[in-house]
């Protein structure tokens, strides 16, 4: 598990640096919050069983690519894609897989951008390329996802239809709210840009 912990720390530091650099240079930070987790051994075994695979080290390495997980929350969906772009631009990162549940939401309403990346971990006598799962979503959708996850496990995956429907409706409301907040932010940005252009003009006159 050690190598996964190292990979997790590397990705966490990388994302923190990118965010702080953007905040310093552009006075804007796309990441609101970062959270890391290492998958528990029991959950790793459950995942292998779910996939119908034998419990071997090779199968874990090849088929369980979310042992190291990072969750990134952003204010707006535009920031989610900005973070994705920043990750893709990193020379030492290879994006192995991307699932866009924002453009293609899941049936239950879940919206999030999922990446599996590979990052090199340099140790004393070897370099290992370690997979890390990165989930990027809005704060509002993260709130929904954490409640939905709890409900899913509370009902042992058999969520009653009435609750399933209500969850879908709340996910749709959140998607609508995310859209409105993003448009509002764009409007504010436009007004700010216009007023700074007017200030410039006034100074030159
Ligand atoms: P846990 O307990 O959170 O780790 P794969 O990993 O590719 O074999 P899958 O399900 O095809 O499996 O990958 P996907 O769709 O990218 O989902 C990976 C993770 O995203 C899940 O991990 C969840 O954490 C989260 N996720 C996916 N769908 C939903 C959803 O509908 N609701 C919520 N709340 N979270 C979701 P695990 O291993 O399933 O679970």
Image (spheres, rainbow, N blue to C red):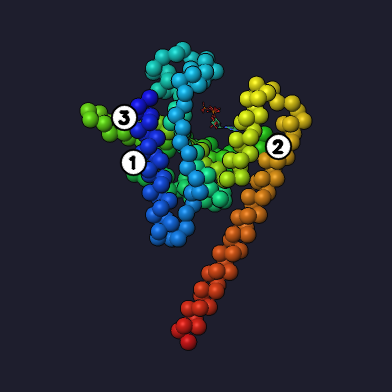
Depth order, front residue of 62/165: 165
Q: Earlier in the sequence, mark 2 or mark 3?
A: 3
Residue at 58 percent across and 45 percent down: it is 139
Contact between marks 2 and 3 (CB within 8 A): the answer is no
Q: Which mark is residue 168?
A: 2
Residue 34: x and y in percent read: 47, 42
Q: How far apart, in angstroms, are the residues tagged by discs 3 and 1?
A: 12 Å
Q: Nearer the viewer, mark 1 or mark 2?
A: 2
Task: Assign the N terminus to one quadrant of the image.
Answer: top left
Displayed quadrant of residue 101 = top right
**Cβ of mark 1 under 8 A from ligand 1:** no
Q: Earlier in the sequence, mark 3 or mark 1?
A: 1
* Disc 1, SS: loop
> Residue under circle 1?
92
> Residue under circle 3?
128
Q: Let me know if residue 105 appears in the view.
A: no
Q: Earlier in the sequence, mark 1 or mark 2?
A: 1
Residue 136: x and y in percent read: 52, 42
Residue at 43 percent across and 57 percent down: it is 23
Contact between marks 3 and 1 (CB within 8 A): the answer is no
């Amino acid at each position: 598990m050690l190598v996964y912990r190292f990979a997790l720390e590397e990705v966490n530091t990388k994302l923190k640096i990118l965010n702080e650099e953007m905040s310093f240079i552009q006075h804007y930070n796309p990441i609101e919050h970062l959270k890391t987790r290492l998958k528990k051994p029991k959950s790793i075994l459950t995942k292998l069983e779910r996939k119908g695979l034998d419990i071997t080290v090779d199968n874990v390495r090849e088929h369980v690519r979310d042992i190291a997980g990072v969750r990134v929350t952003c204010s707006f969906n535009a920031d989610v894609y900005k973070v994705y772009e920043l990750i893709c631009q990193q020379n030492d990162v290879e994006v192995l897989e991307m699932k866009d549940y924002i453009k293609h939401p899941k049936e239950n309403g879940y919206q999030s951008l999922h990446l599996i990346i590979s990052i090199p971990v340099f140790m004393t006598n070897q370099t290992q390329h370690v997979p890390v799962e990165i989930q990027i979503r809005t704060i509002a959708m993260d709130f929904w996802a954490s409640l939905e996850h709890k409900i899913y496990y509370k009902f042992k995956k058999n969520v009653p239809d009435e609750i399933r429907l209500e969850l879908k409706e709340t996910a749709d409301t959140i998607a609508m709210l995310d859209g409105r907040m993003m448009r509002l932010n764009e409007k504010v940005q436009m007004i700010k840009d216009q007023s700074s252009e007017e200030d410039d003009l006034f100074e030159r006159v």
